[in-house]
Image: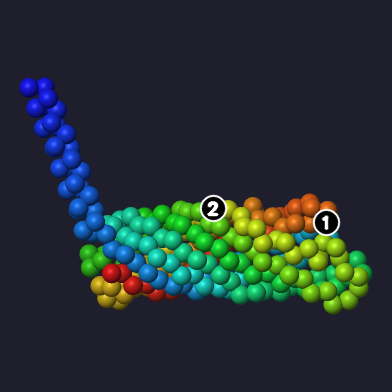
Amino acid sequence: MKNLVKSLVVASALSVAGTASADWFDCFSPVIGADYYQVWTSPKNSNLNIRHARDYPGATIYVGGRADCFGLEVGYDVSATRSRAFTAGATSGTTRVQRQGWHIDLIGYMPLDCFECVDLFGTIGWGWIQPRRTFNITSGPALGFATNNNSRRGNSVLRLGIGANYMFTECVGARLKLGYESTSTIRFTGPAGTSYRPFGDSFTLAVGAFVKF
């Protein structure tokens, strides 16, 4: 009798779990999209007064999915190369930095209208940013630090965002998102193997379109 009861309990639990799983997959919609991605950051001086650009226009492509009020997004981010002039003692030149990396975000949605055309959403996630830096010395002696372009290692950052979606059709929509990235964790290599943090935290703007299948 006990074995029969156990079997019935297990069968009931599996049935409920299977039904819930089937319902979740029934309402799950794959998403693919692309954004214009603008980053503003506050550069800091290094010990040699090397400076970096404040803004980085770029793009994001992403794939993910949505089930009811929750979603997941995995994307690739890349920026244009931005330059900034510097003078360190008798040496002058420019720094050139390009950002690229990956991210994964968890998304929570809040529908605003009964026609399901407009959603507000919030995101929290993890990013991996790999700044690629080069120097162009225009006058004066080359700095040993400036010729060491090994700042290609990535750094983890926290990502937060808020935004809104608008659906033009059942499948095609647009989104606007404001975000924050903890880019003050990014380190560059300095003289004699030392490291320093060239950026403060960043604020971002993403505008783009997506397709929901």
SS at mark 2? strand
- State the residue in front, 60 or 57: 60
Identify the amino acid type marked 2: Leu
Is residue 14 depicted above or below 63 in this figure?
Answer: above
Residue drawn at x 12%, y 25% is: 3
Q: Residues within 10 Å of mark 1 (few under 14, many from 20)?
A: some
Q: Classify residue 152 by image quadrant.
A: bottom right
**Residue at mark 1:** 191
Q: Which mark is residue 8?
A: none
Identify the amino acid type marked 1: Pro
Instruction: Name the quarter where the C terminus is drawn.
Output: bottom left
Residue drawn at x 82%, y 61% is: 145
Check the image and name the residue furthest to the top.
2
In this picture, residue 179 sits left or right of residue 33: right
**Residue at mark 2:** 158
Check the image and name the residue furthest to the left.
1
In this picture, residue 102 sits left or right of residue 88: left
Residue 72 shows in the view: yes
Residue 38 shows in the view: no
